[in-house]
Amino acid sequence: MITIEKLVKIYPDGTQAVKDLSFTVEKGEVCVLLGPSGCGKTTTMKMINRLIPISGGKIYINGQDNTGINADQLRRDIGYAIQQIGLFPHMTVGGNIQVVPVLKGWPEAKRRARARELLDLVGLDPDTYYNRYPAELSGGQRQRVGVARCLGADPEILLMDEPFGAIDPITRSRLQDEFLKIQEEIRKTIVFVTHDLGEALKMGDKIALMRAGELVQFDTPSNLLYQPKNEFVRKFVGADRALQGLRLLKLREVMETDPPTTDLDIPVAQAMERMKQNKTTWLMAVDGTGKFVGWIDRAELRDHPGDKTLHEVLLEPTVTALPETFLNEALSLMLGSTIGNLAVVDRRGYLQGVLTFNKIRDVITESNRGEDS
């Protein structure tokens, strides 16, 4: 989809911002350009849609030299999102999303339908937000509109320059999660610039780690962590590679899918026996439909008669997670859990599994074995 061959950028003052850069982004991949400030990652991205002219080398889009494509047409066919978002303040949300479709001559009905579809896709109710202006939105909402505008004309390629960098960490994490879910559906080819290692590990199928305009390592997130090419990469990813690796796994990959469960109508004595059989100090309570309703803790049972049911000792859940939650985020959630474990449920609340600290320890141990081998 995007092939970069021996790319060079030299500015008039002699500064060489990009040096002999080569890599390929396959169709449907998210390729993250990562590195310290001034390493050339944004310059590289802007050369893809010719916002910055190249000094040497080639960039091919679907096999075609991008310098042979009309610049205006090239930019209209590539979605572009930036950290500052850049919404037009005099336009409504709907108008902002339709900017490129207008330039491409789409009929009004098609443009409006597309804008409403995209608002729904990024989690903003079209009836509520379509006619609002950017000044009426929160930072996170403006960011969502920026992503929707990037997708306005349904481009095959998206360029995203730190698109979630100007918002608070909680909103940023939520938007990252939502964008990954959207990407699972739309499968665009994306070049994504960030200086944040955690974001790169989370968002990227491939990572191009750059330094002083040069490509140091082009690899999968896992290989970047566990097979660093040289000392610069090793220092960049840090000594806590095993913990960083928790960003690469989702709960559905590591959770226990058959945890010990109970309904609330059995007596305390029976619950104690079930814990003994399962060699645990807890049970996960579910209702008759399989929805998770809370925890039964052995310590809470000791002061209750054996013939009493579990309704009186139910510990309601303080946090739960989804199967697509990343393991590092799940670990943070576990610290606020009622019982120290983390219930994994689907979006309707049905129990899918459980994550325990023992399981996280096993994952880290296995990662360390892989790094040492």
Image (spheres, grey):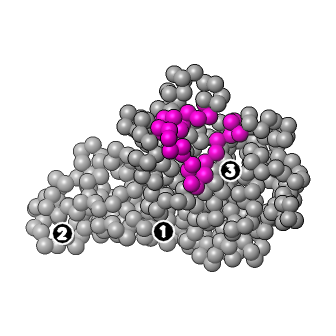
Residue 282 place in picture, x, y as percent? 29, 66
Q: Which residues are magenta?
A: 75-101
Quadrant position of residue 22: bottom right
> Residue 141: x, y in percent?
45, 48
Horizontal and vertical percent position of residue 326: 50, 59
Q: Nearer the viewer, residue 207 or 194?
A: 194
> What residue did someone put label 1 on?
360
Query: Which mark, residue 72?
Result: none
Tell me the amino acid under the disc marked 3: Val
Q: What's the mark number on residue 301?
A: 2
- The secondary element bearing badge 1 is classed as helix
Helix, strand or loop at mark 3: strand
Image quarter where the N terminus lies is top right
Number of numbered discs visible in the structure rendering = 3
Q: Residues within 10 Å of mark 2 (few under 14, many from 20)?
A: some
Q: Nearer the viewer, mark 1 or mark 2?
A: 1
- Whether the magenta-drawn stretch holds residue 179 is answered as no
Residue drawn at 87 percent across, 54 percent down: 55
Q: Is residue 95 magenta?
A: yes
- Residue 235: x and y in percent read 69, 76
User: Is residue 125 depicted above or below 59 in this figure?
Assistant: above
User: Mark 2 falls on what kind of element?
Assistant: helix
Q: Earlier in the sequence, mark 1 or mark 3?
A: 3
